[in-house]
Amino acid sequence: MAADAPLQTDTAAARAEGRKEKGNEAFKEGNYPQAAVFYTQTLELAPIHYVALANRSACFLKMAGLSKICLPRHSYPCQLSEFSPTTL
């Protein structure tokens, strides 16, 4: 590859990460249906994106009104660093 060749930044992983970030923004605004759409789009681009899967599940819980029962500690999109084998 030539030194002056542009880097390929439009990859499926990059697009997936962008969709996840849009989902996070929608979630923070309380727009859970739109956030779920963005997380679903993330999963279409990166099927094993566990953070997007967990965040989409949080959207479904919020939309069902179950968040007070099921998500007492996590009322926001989660980050991968919050999980460890001992907390799962």
Image (tube, rainbow, N blue to C red):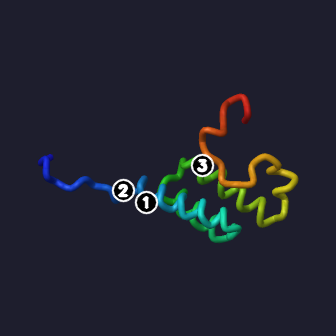
Relative image position of residue 5 (x, y in whole percent):
16, 53
Relative image position of residue 75 (x, y in whole percent):
75, 54
Residue 2 lies left or right of residue 78; in this view the side is left
The answer to which of marks 1 and 3 sits earlier in the sequence is: 1
* SS of the residue under disc 1: helix
Residue to which mark 3 is pinned: 51
Q: Is residue 51 visible?
A: yes
The answer to which of marks 3 and 2 sits earlier in the sequence is: 2
Picture quadrant of residue 57: bottom right
Q: Quadrant of the C terminus?
A: top right
Q: How many marks?
A: 3
> Disc 1, disc 3: CB below 8 Å?
no
**Extreme residue toward the right, this view:** 69
Nearer the observer, 37 or 48: 37
* SS of the residue under disc 3: helix
Q: Residue at x 72, y 28 (%)?
A: 86
From mark 2 to mark 1, how far is it between C-alphas?
Answer: 6 Å
Residue 72 lies left or right of residue 46; in this view the side is right
Q: Amino acid at mark 1?
A: Arg
Determine crowd level at label 1: few under 14, some 14-19, many 20+ residues with C-alpha closer than 10 A: some
Determine crowd level at label 3: few under 14, some 14-19, many 20+ residues with C-alpha closer than 10 A: some
Relative image position of residue 31 (x, y in whole percent):
68, 70
* SS of the residue under disc 2: loop
What label sits on residue 70 in the rendered view? none
Residue 51 lies left or right of residue 44; in this view the side is right
What label sits on residue 11 in the rendered view? 2
From mark 3 to mark 2, how far is it between C-alphas?
Answer: 18 Å
Q: Residue at x 61, y 46 (%)?
A: 79
Q: Residue at x 62, y 67 (%)?
A: 26
Residue to which mark 1 is pinned: 15
> Disc 2, disc 1: CB below 8 Å?
yes
Picture quadrant of residue 64: bottom right
